[in-house]
Image: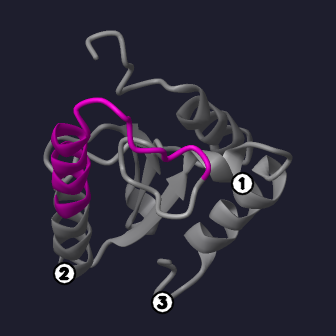
Amino acid sequence: MSRIRSKDTKPEMMVRKFLFGKGYRYRLYDKKLPGKPDLVLSKYKTVIFVHGCFWHGHTGCKYFVVPKTKTEWWLNKINRNKELDRKSVKKLKTDGWKVIIIFECKLKDGKAGKTLENIANRIEANGNTNH
């Protein structure tokens, strides 16, 4: 697991390049905020998490398959990740942040363009933009 990247992943870089190209400016991995969001757009009071489907247990996704070995250990780890995600999102919303969560599968299989445009629309939108 030491070789697994937690920063600068391909899906994350895709989102960053798109947003930068659209003129959005952001900070990366703000440790002061719950969950250390991947991107923080302070001007829009918006944070973006780009989640790996496996690591964050994306239910119903073809990229989330529980390993056949050490199954209990993996399920505990993934469930811990999901619980930490829930707590972070709840705290961020309580503090007035707009939270956008993008799973890696939404940036694959020809879905990237639509997903990226949706992110830009959600940044600009008022009110609740979470799913």
- Sooner in the amino-acid sequence: mark 3 or mark 2: 2
- The residue carrying mark 2 is 94
Identify the element where label 1 is drawn.
Answer: helix
**In front: label 3 or label 1:** 1
Name the spot of residue 9 as percent of width and height, x first: 50, 26
The residue lying toward the viewer, choosing from 108 and 58, is 58
Q: Identify the amino acid type marked 3.
A: Gly
Residue at 59% from the left image edge and 35% from the top image edge: 11
Q: Is residue 23 visible?
A: no
Identify the element where label 3 is drawn.
Answer: loop
- Is the Cβ of the residue at disc 3 closer than 8 Å to that at disc 1? no
Name the spot of residue 47 as percent of width and height, x first: 39, 58
The residue lying toward the viewer, choosing from 91 and 76, is 76
Lateral position of residue 119 relative to residue 58, left or right = right
> Which residues are the magenta region?
62-83
Q: Quadrant of residue 27?
A: top left
- Residue 23 falls within the magenta-colored stretch: no
- Residue 66 falls within the magenta-colored stretch: yes
Question: In the displayed image of the protein, which residue is found farthest to the top?
Answer: 3
- Is the Cβ of the residue at disc 2 closer than 8 Å to that at disc 1? no
The residue lying toward the viewer, choosing from 88 and 97, is 88
- The residue carrying mark 1 is 116
Residue 30 in the image: above or below residue 6? below
Q: Residues within 10 Å of mark 1 (few under 14, many from 20)?
A: some
Q: Residues within 10 Å of mark 2 (few under 14, many from 20)?
A: few
- The residue carrying mark 3 is 127
